[in-house]
Image (cartoon, rainbow, N blue to C red):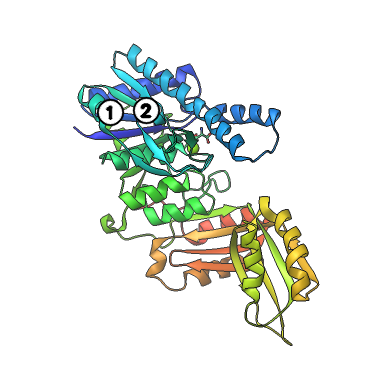
Amino acid sequence: MALIVHKYGGTSMGSPERIKNVAKRVAKWARAGHQMVVVPSAMSGETNRLLGLAKELAPAKETRSYMRELDMLASTGEQASSALLAIALQSEGMDSVSYAGWQVPIRTDSAYTKARIESIDDVRVRGDLQAGRVVIITGFQGVDENQNITTLGRGGSDTSAVAVAAAMKADECLIYTDVDGVYTTDPRVVPEARRLKTVSFEEMLEMASLGSKVLQIRSVEFAGKYKVPLRVLSSFTPWDINIQEEAKSGTLITFEEDTQMEQAVVSGIAFNRDEAKISIIGVPDKPGIAYQILGSVAEGNIEVDMIIQNIGKDGRTDFSFTVHRNDFARAMDLLKAKVLPTLGSTEALGDTKICKVSIVGIGMRSHVGIASKMFRTLSEEGINIQMISTSEIKTSVVIDEKYMELAVRALHKAFDLDQVQA
Ligand code: ASP
Ligand code: MG
C-alpha cells in the first residue's frame, strides 16, 4: 500500500462526464489498496470566467483590497470542482471528503494572486485516510495568517499537489493532464517530437522556465527541494486501463543521483515568444553603467533576462537586454524618462519580434562542443543569432521571431531528438 497524490488539470475536470471518469480512475487506485489524496484544478475555463467577471466590474485595478477579493473569487473554482469530485466518488461507492485550502489548512504568505505555501498541516487528512476515505484537496489556494484566502498564481494547482505530496511524504505524485507527458519539444511545431520516458528535475526546471507549459515552474522547484517523485501523464487514457501499466506511463521526473543510464546530451528544445529586446546605443564604457541602467529597470519592478554588453569603441558601447513583452512599453518609457538623459546617450531601440530558443540537457555538463553545434546548425539555416546565454545545462539564443519554427526543427534534428530513445 502506498500513499499517492493525483492531480487533475482543468481539462480533465472539464465536464460532469470527465469528472465521473476521474472518479472511476481514483476509485480504481483506492481499490488497489492505495491511500489517495486528489488535488483538482477548477473546471476548464472557470478561473478565466471568474476573473473576467471581476474585470468587468473593475478593469485593471491593482489595490491590495481588490487583489484580496480576486483570490476570494478565483478560489471558488477549485472549491466547486473538488466538491463535485467528492460527490462523484461517493456515487462510485467510495467514501470521500473534500477540503478547501483553509480547512486543511494549507498556510501561505499574504501575497494575493501569487502566494507561496509556507506549511501544510496533514493531521486532518491523515485521519480521513486512516478511516479509508479518499481526500480531495482544492488546488491553487491556501490561507494566510489572518484567515484570508489566497491563491498561488495561475497554474498553481500543480504546486498544491506537489506541496501536499511533499508534506505527506507521498510515495508518488501523479500529474494527470491533457498531454501524455513531457516532449522533446512542442509536437505542434515538430511532429517528430517524442515523449520522454524520464527527464531530470533540473532539465524540467529549465524547460518550465524557458516556456514549456506542462508544469507550473514553482511545482518543479518544490519537487526538487523535497525530492517528490513526480510523474506527468495523460488523463485521457481509458480509466480502466491496467493500473501497473498506467503507473509506468507518461514522463517521470528523476533526480540525478537515481539516473544511472547514459544521458542524451540534449533532452529537449524549448522556445518562447514572451520576450522583447531593448538596446541602448552609445552608452559610456565605464564602471557603473550596467548598474545605472538595470538598477532603474529593477526599481520599476521589471525583470531582465538576457544581457549583453559589447566591447567598447571610442569610450562608447552598446548595451542590450531582454524583458518580458508585457513589460516592454513600461521599460522603454522608464529608460527614456530616467536613464537616457543621465547617460548622455541618445537612443534606445526596441525589438518585440524576437524569440528565444534553448537547448536543454544535463548531458551538456560532460560534453563539450554542444553550444557550437547549436550555432553551426543555426548558421546552416542562415539564422542570425542576436544574443546568447548559457548555463551548465542549457544554451539559449535570441533570434528573429520569424525563424522560430525553422530553428526548433533544425535543432531537433541536429541533436537526434527524433530518434527513439534506447
Ligand atoms: N484554476 C487555476 C488556473 O486556471 C489553477 C490551475 O488550474 O492550476 O490557473
Ligand atoms: Mg495546468
Q: Are there few (<14), some (14-19), or many (20+) residues within 10 Å of tag 1?
A: few
Q: Residue at x 67, y 50 (%)?
A: 326
* Image quadrant assignment for residue 139: top left
Residue 353 visible? The answer is no
Q: Identify the residue position indicated by label 1 in the image.
A: 124
Indicate the secondary structure of the residue bearing disc 2. Answer: helix
What label sits on residue 152 in the rendered view?
Answer: none
Furthest-bottom residue in this view: 314
Image coordinates for residue 276, horizontal then vertical, percent: 68, 57
Q: CA distance from mark 1 to mark 2?
A: 9 Å
Name which residue type carries label 2: Gln
* Image quadrant assignment for residue 85: top left
Please say if the residues under marks 1 and 2 sit with CB atoms less than 8 Å apart: yes
Q: Residue at x 63, y 40 (%)?
A: 63
Q: Give the answer, above or below, for where 263 lies relative to 84.
A: below
Q: Identify the residue position indicated by label 2 in the image.
A: 103
* In front of the other: 357 or 158: 158
